């Protein structure tokens, strides 16, 4: 058996605790040798809760000290480009969390650095490894809904009940994106996978809570080259559990995917139905164990994603979620912001650049009166 891939986890916040941490021990061929975070508490958590032995405050310190083959970068988005480029310059492979970066230009820089270094660059689109998402792709491949006509994606949050965003980086202007950048990056990647490239985008964005300097609501319509329209929406005025819901409309059927039971539980497959004739509902959710540990060990999407990354590092194969697919998503995200700023449909490829901070400053918040005092 070949040596395990030695990985450093860079940025040890939520992405470690809610996504990868619980499945790290079950990933074949992986040894997580170091954690990197500016924050001592994050490093202590990485060590005490996830058994990552060595902690460093900077990537440089880590790479100067440890023998590392690869990093998983899960820092705020505005750090992605510099860190991913630094890794390439040191010959280190990268699994880079979504969104790949803030702008297509930053993505180009990352892709060029990794091409030059001949290192593997993969983007963290873990939904491509979710069993229900894979099953939906299989149904589409089999022609289960005939010609695809549209996609509707809602990712709604009940956050407005207690708007407490505070000083977190996700709400800050320097991120150059909010909820659309964060969640839209997944839904646009899925739309690319299911319906092919996007040709044009029209969008509106809103700020509906205090402390937000970037959008926390979005309404985006994408027209794909195939003619399919994908609609991506998110509101904070949902007043129930988080919901992630996809409908794929076809000539002869509709596929429905829903995050099961509203629980933020990443190992379970999504509910998956095929609807026909307005009255038939076929259940296609893959069978799963309610023993979440067993389920996660075998099928957890982050585990399968990491195993794919390990395999790519070992064989130097092109990952399923490549840098180019990450860039394609960031281009759509940026085109949507430009569309909202200029109040027009924007056509791809995107040739214009956008002053993101000026755009977010121009959004007049629609914050309900009860937040005013
Ligand atoms: N795919 C998923 O399911 C998923 C889930 C959560 C987060 N993410 C992605 O992971 C990234 C991080 O999100 P999060 O929710 O974990 O954020 P977070 O704020 O919880 O954690 C970020 C961590 O990075 C650290 N950090 C900041 N700058 C750093 C630097 N230069 N070097 C090292 N560490 C640094 C911070 O101290 C913090 O601990 C984002 O890109 C986000 O979109 C993906």
Image (spheres, rainbow, N blue to C red):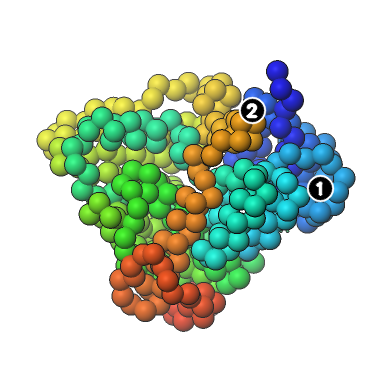
Q: Percent from the top left, x then y, of residue 231?
A: 30, 56
**Other-residue count near label 2 (Cα within 10 Å), few / some / many at <14 / 14–19 / ≥20:** many
- Left or right: 64 in relation to 315: right
Q: Given this view, does label 1 or label 2 mark the residue nearer the observer?
A: 1
**Other-residue count near label 1 (Cα within 10 Å), few / some / many at <14 / 14–19 / ≥20:** many
Image: 332 above or below 192: below
Residue name at image x 86 percent, y 49 percent: 64
Judging by the rendered image, the residue that carries numbered circle 1 is 63
- Ligand 1 neighbours mark 1 (CB distance < 8 Å): no
> Label 1's element?
helix
Q: Distance between the residues labelled 1 and 2?
A: 22 Å
> Label 2's element?
loop
- The disc, 1 or 2, on the residue closer to the chain's N-terminal end is 2
- Ligand 1 neighbours mark 2 (CB distance < 8 Å): no
Q: Which of 201 and 282 is in front in this view?
A: 201
The reply to whether the C-beta atoms of the residues labelled 1 and 2 are less than 8 Å apart is: no
Residue name at image x 63 percent, y 63 percent: 78
User: Residue 171's image quarter?
Assistant: bottom right
Image: 11 above or below 310: below
Image: 334 above or below 99: below
* Residue 95 in sight here: no
Judging by the rendered image, the residue that carries numbered circle 2 is 27
User: Residue 269's image quarter?
Assistant: top left
Q: Which of 33 and 53 is in front in this view?
A: 33
Q: Percent from the top left, x then y, of residue 142?
A: 26, 30
Q: Percent from the top left, x then y, of residue 332?
A: 41, 61
Q: Which residue lies furthest to the top in this view?
A: 1
């Amino acid at each position: 058996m070949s040596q395990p891939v030695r990985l450093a986890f860079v940025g040890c916040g939520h992405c470690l605790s809610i996504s990868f941490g619980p499945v790290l021990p079950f990933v074949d061929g992986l040894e997580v040798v170091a954690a990197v975070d500016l924050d001592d508490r994050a490093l202590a958590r990485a060590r005490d809760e996830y058994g990552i032995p060595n902690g460093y405050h900077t990537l440089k310190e880590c790479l100067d000290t440890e023998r590392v083959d690869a990093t998983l970068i899960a820092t705020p988005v505005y750090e992605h480009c510099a860190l991913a480029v630094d890794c390439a310059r040191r010959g280190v492979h990268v699994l880079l969390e979504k969104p790949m970066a803030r702008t297509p230009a930053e993505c180009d820089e990352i892709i060029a650095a990794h091409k030059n270094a001949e290192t593997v660059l993969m983007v963290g689109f873990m939904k491509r490894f979710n069993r229900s998402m894979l099953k939906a792709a299989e149904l589409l491949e089999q022609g289960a809904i005939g010609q695809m006509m549209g996609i509707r994606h809602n990712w709604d949050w009940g956050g407005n009940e207690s708007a407490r965003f505070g000083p977190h980086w996700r709400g800050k202007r320097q991120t150059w994106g909010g909820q659309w950048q964060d969640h839209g990056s997944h839904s646009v990647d899925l739309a690319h996978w299911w319906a092919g490239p996007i040709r044009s985008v029209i969008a509106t964005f809103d700020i509906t809570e205090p402390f937000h300097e970037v959008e926390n609501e979005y309404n985006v319509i994408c027209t794909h080259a195939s003619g399919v329209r994908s609609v991506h929406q998110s509101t904070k005025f949902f007043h129930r559990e988080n919901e992630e819901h996809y409908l794929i409309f076809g000539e002869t059927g509709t596929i429905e995917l829903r995050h099961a039971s509203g629980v933020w539980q990443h190992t379970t497959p999504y509910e998956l139905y095929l609807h026909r004739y307005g009255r038939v509902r076929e259940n296609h959710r893959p069978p799963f164990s309610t023993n979440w540990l067993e389920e996660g060990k075998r099928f957890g999407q982050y585990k399968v994603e990491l195993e794919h990354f390990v395999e790519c590092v070992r064989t130097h194969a092109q990952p399923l979620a490549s840098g180019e697919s990450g860039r394609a998503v960031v281009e759509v995200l940026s085109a949507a912001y430009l569309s909202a700023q200029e109040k027009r449909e924007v056509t791809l490829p995107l040739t214009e650049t956008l002053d993101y901070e000026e755009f977010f400053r121009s959004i007049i918040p629609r914050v309900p009166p009860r937040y005013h005092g």
